[in-house]
Image (tube, grey):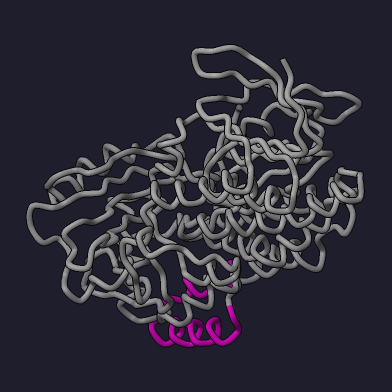
Amino acid sequence: MSKVYDVVVVGAGVAGLYASSQLASMGWKVALVESKQASRIGDKVCGDAIGTHHFSELGLSVPENIIDRRYRGVKIYSPSKKYSIVVPGEGVSVNRLKFGQWLLKRALDYGVDLFDQHVAIDVVLKDNYVKSIKVKRIRGSVFELEAKVFIDASGYRPAIRSKLPAEWPLSERPYSTDYNIAYREVVAPSSRVIAEEDLNYAVIYLDVEVAPGGYWWLFPKTEEGSVVNVGLGVINNGEHNPRAQYERYLRPVFRGRVLSAGGGVVPTRRPLPTLTWRNVVAVGDAAYTVNPVHGGGIGSSMISSHIASKYINSALEAGRVDEETLWQANVDYMYAYGAKQAGLDVLRMFMQKLSNSDYEWIIENKVVDGSSVYDLGVRGDLAEKVVYAISTLIKLLGRPSLLNQLRVVRSYMNKARELYTTRYPRSPREVHKWMADVEKLFDEYARVIGYTRGNLVKW
């Protein structure tokens, strides 16, 4: 049995749901394949936080019943918890299940055909394009879905990308350290666990003993802090187990009724070199659209889907879908978010080598302030005024080695951003050479700072 569509989307996370509804609203026949049952779509282990500017950029008016808590910004604590900085910027904590169900309803209302409790098990190639995907109903039969375009929104372990020819640039494999692994719980604590002055913030704690290569977080889900989202992420280098870290360091503090618990994997690196090849498009975690430093990916996932949907629509209308007709989606995404990710990937590798004493010194001496961190997060570069201020302070406070390291980081961040903007290929014919330049830059940077990237992931 075979069913024919204009677009087949694999994965009903925020990226897949948003892409499905966008394309269906444009009049295309869309199928959405998801392993979960429909009533559980949206249920995902996550920090649940997102900056409201993402909703504004996408023109999304999210119902209030989906929002658990509004934040004035992010508060970052030093390892000792004696010092902190506040990063301004309105954000919200969403109920992920309700958010997913709302996005699903939008997609279904536009006419998307949902194949819940189905998994994509293989791709069928014809003339160097994907003709169809083989789909299996859980505990059921196998059939094929044909389409003109296939969107891989299946997450960090991509169901479609992992089965494509190795020579397609869309098949690029990451290194093991390009991921953080996380564990989190939503808890109704038996006693107060968050200070009154922190109730209006998403709180992040930098502590390499608790969360090696990452951080741990405490996000209030209710106004009075009676429910909190608490968890941690660690670098995926085979040395640390996030659940074990949670049990050792956080469980004794956050005792109470556990409302939700689980682990997950987050890609924390620059984006794929291309989101498109032939008639396949990757979005969301499958395309590594997550912020490398703080691991937030809800907003950027939807941004990737928004941009991809625009060019898929144009290609379908023109009657030709390939990397040439879809290429501008890459250029737009790199300028919108990908270049920032590339710069922050450089910073992420540097931060994963810092010690608790480094973090303590930086925050205690106010080497960076909240507005500077906000600029860094929004723009992804080390602004000249920030570098000047940091350099001056470090000179005065006597940490010349840190100043030299910062200069190296700044230099490579700028090089990475340039590669993903002005030097990004304007046609797919140039992409393989460009990919070699990117790999050369990051290999060189890893050697310079003594960073071990690990092994290439095996699908």
Residue extent of the magenta highlight: 383-409
Queried whether the magenta region covers residue 40, the answer comes back as: no
230 horizontally vs 396: left or right: left
Q: Residue furthest left?
A: 191
Above or below, comparing residue 130 to residue 29 in the picture = above
Q: Position of residue 437 (x, y in %)?
A: 79, 53
Image-quadrant location for residue 9: top right
| Helix, strand or loop: magenta stretch | helix
Q: Nearer the viewer, residue 212 or 162?
A: 162
Queried whether the magenta region covers residue 400, the answer comes back as: yes
Image-quadrant location for residue 238: top left
Number of numbered callouts drawn: 0
Above or below, comparing residue 458 to residue 30 in the picture = above
Image-quadrant location for residue 63: bottom left
Residue depicted at 42% across the width and 75% down the height: 90
Q: Quarter of the image containing the N terminus?
A: top right
Q: Position of residue 204 (x, y in %)?
A: 33, 63
371 horizontally vs 321: left or right: left
Q: Position of residue 297 (x, y in %)?
A: 51, 55
Residue depicted at 71% across the width and 61% down the height: 334
Residue 172 makes an appearance in the image: yes
Above or below, comparing residue 51 to residue 39 in the picture = below
Residue 443 makes an appearance in the image: no
Q: Quarter of the image containing the C terminus?
A: top right
Residue depicted at 36% across the width and 38% down the height: 263
Residue depicted at 45% across the width and 82% down the height: 371
Q: Position of residue 48 (x, y in %)?
A: 39, 55
Q: Nearer the viewer, residue 277 or 86?
A: 277
